[in-house]
Structure formats: structure tokens, C-alpha cells
Image (tube, rainbow, N blue to C red):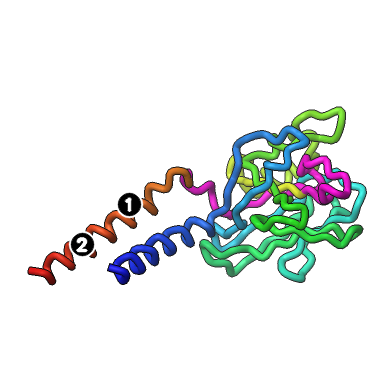
């Protein structure tokens, strides 16, 4: 019986691992301060090429987007700057590191920072992010040249947007996630709801039924 439960646990672990790779994309607008807006999932590729466009910034510090240790875009670059990552595989976790060069703090999507908060928000539209006070939600005009670059590559609805909150809670963070906002084309769409987890439960149930049938045949 112990072996049966271990095997069933392995089935559940595999299913959970598959879900953990997805990019959680929120459709809820961020109303600052909102420490809970950060994603708990990694950013993954949904195509062999991922385009990244610098869409918006609102930070006094120098913020960077790196791919591993390679600088992709800085907030010192022009809004609308675009880079492409090629040779990717679907489901590949992208090694994006969002760094506040001024403070020396770095943030990764799905990984809690030292203040216990997620500092990367992944949203279905740029209009989910706010400007600084007096606050209003971003418009195409706020994106400026970036909007033209983005829509010149693909329709706006095909893009996903990720925003950085570049200060820790102890540094006076306003948790609006608009310090550095990028448009991403070619990252994974939202996963199915994780609560309840029907796929995991069905796999577990199917596994237990199958193992029980094997035991009955052996007993006979």
C-alpha cells in the first residue's frame, strides 16, 4: 500500500510541477498600494521568439531588465525600445531579472523579495497600471512611442504587460508596479484556475483507481 501512495504522490507532483511553470496573468487592474498584485508564477515562453518593448516608466532610480546577466533594457533607454529573444522553446522559463541599480535590489517574477512581497506584476493589458499621483490608468497616449512600436509588431490584444515595483516595503514602496513596464509578445497565457485543481485531483483519482485494480487482479 505504501508503494501505491508513493506512486500516487508522484503523479500529483508531476501535475503540480507542470502548473508551476505557467505565467500567471492577472486581469484585475492594480489600484495602488496593492502589495498583492505581484505574480506568484514565473514568466515562460509561449513561442520560439519573445519580443520585449519598453512601454512606460515611473521611477527616480535606475531600473534594468536583464536576461540572466545580459542587459536588455534600462529605463535610461528611450520608451519604445524593443528587443527580441530567439531560439526559445515553448514552456521555457525566461531568465528575466528586474534590477534597481540604485539600491542594488533585484527581483524575479514568482520569487518573493526580502520583504516577503512579489515585485513583478504580470497583467493582460497596459491599462491595468496606474500613473503616479494624481493617479489614472494608463492610456495609449501615456505609452507614447511605445504604443506605435507595440501595435506595429502585433495587435495590442496579443501582448502581455509586466510591471516592476522597484522599492522594498522598508524603502517606502508605493506598490503600484509601474516603475518599469514592459510589453511582452510570446509569453504563456493565463493557466486554468488552480483552486480547485481538477486536473491534479483527476490524475490522483485515476492513479488510485488503476493501482487498486492492479491489487485486485494480483489478489485474485
Residue 77 visible, this orientation: no
Residue on which disc 2 sits: 212
Name the residue nearer the viewer: 173 or 46: 173
- Majority SS type along the magenta span: loop
Q: CA distance from mark 1 to mark 2?
A: 15 Å
Q: Is residue 179 left or right of residue 48?
A: right
Who comes first in sequence, dot 1 or dot 2?
A: 1
The stretch in magenta equals: 165-193
Label drawn at residue 202 = 1
Vertical side of 201 occupied by 175: above or below: above
Q: Is residue 62 left or right of residue 156?
A: right
Label drawn at residue 139 = none
Whether residue 171 appears in magenta in the rendering, the answer is yes
Residue 157 position within the rendered picture, expressed as x and y whole percent measured from the top left: 59, 40
Residue 58 position within the rendered picture, expressed as x and y whole percent measured from the top left: 85, 43
Whether residue 170 appears in magenta in the rendering, the answer is yes
Say which quadrant the C terminus sits in: bottom left
Amino acid at each position: 500500500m505504501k508503494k501505491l501512495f508513493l506512486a500516487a504522490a508522484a503523479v500529483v507532483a508531476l501535475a503540480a510541477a507542470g502548473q508551476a511553470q505557467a505565467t500567471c496573468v492577472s486581469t484585475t487592474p492594480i489600484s495602488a498600494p496593492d502589495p498583492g498584485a505581484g505574480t506568484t508564477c514565473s514568466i515562460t515562453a509561449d513561442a520560439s521568439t519573445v519580443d520585449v518593448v519598453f512601454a512606460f516608466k515611473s521611477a527616480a532610480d535606475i531600473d534594468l531588465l536583464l536576461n540572466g546577466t545580459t542587459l536588455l533594457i534600462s529605463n535610461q533607454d528611450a520608451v519604445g525600445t524593443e528587443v527580441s529573444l530567439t531560439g526559445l522553446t515553448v514552456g521555457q522559463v525566461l531568465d528575466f531579472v528586474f534590477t534597481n541599480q540604485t539600491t542594488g535590489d533585484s527581483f524575479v517574477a514568482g520569487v518573493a523579495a526580502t520583504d516577503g512581497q512579489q515585485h513583478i506584476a504580470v497583467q493582460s493589458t497596459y491599462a491595468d497600471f496606474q500613473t503616479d499621483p494624481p493617479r489614472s490608468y494608463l492610456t495609449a497616449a501615456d505609452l507614447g512611442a511605445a504604443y506605435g512600436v507595440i501595435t506595429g509588431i502585433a495587435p495590442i490584444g496579443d501582448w502581455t504587460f509586466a510591471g516592476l515595483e522597484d522599492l522594498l516595503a522598508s524603502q517606502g514602496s508605493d506598490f503600484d508596479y509601474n516603475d518599469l513596464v514592459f510589453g511582452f509578445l510570446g509569453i504563456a497565457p493565463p493557466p486554468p484556475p488552480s483552486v480547485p485543481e481538477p486536473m491534479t485531483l483527476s490524475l490522483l483519482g485515476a492513479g488510485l483507481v488503476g493501482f487498486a485494480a492492479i491489487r485486485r487482479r494480483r489478489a485474485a
